[in-house]
Amino acid sequence: MKMAAQESSQATKTEPIGLQSPASTEKPQNSSVNTMPLE
């Protein structure tokens, strides 16, 4: 879980997408799923 949180944080910094920001803040699990397709 820690890894996913860190990965999502980096992804948000690398890609300033409004959808990623709120998604990771509201639901950390959702951000993990979004990181998969993004890669």
Image (cartoon, helix red, strand yellow):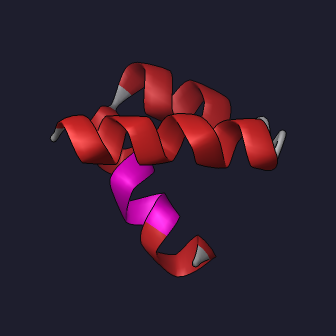
Q: Which residues are magenta?
A: 31-35
Q: In which quarter of the view is residue 26 placed? A: top left
Q: Is residue 30 magenta?
A: no
Residue 19 image point, x, y percent: 68, 42
Q: Is residue 1 above or below residue 39?
A: above
Query: Please, which residue is most extreme toward the right here?
Result: 16
Q: In which quarter of the view is residue 3 placed? A: top left
Q: Residue at x 74, y 36 (%)?
A: 13
Residue 2 image point, x, y percent: 21, 35
Quadrant including the N terminus: top left
Quadrant including the C terminus: bottom right
Q: Residue at x 54, y 34 (%)?
A: 9
Residue 31 image point, x, y percent: 43, 47
Q: Residue at x 36, y 54 (%)?
A: 32
Q: Magenta part mainly helix, strand or loop?
A: helix
Q: Is residue 8 above or below residue 23?
A: below
19 relative to 1 in the view: left or right? right
Q: Is residue 38 above or below residue 3?
A: below
Q: Is residue 34 magenta?
A: yes
Give the number of marks: 0
Q: Nearer the viewer, residue 20 or 14?
A: 14
Q: Residue at x 48, y 43 (%)?
A: 8
37 relative to 17 in the view: left or right? left
Q: Nearer the viewer, residue 11 or 18?
A: 11
Q: In which quarter of the view is residue 29 placed? A: top left
Query: Please, which residue is most extreme toward the left here?
Result: 1
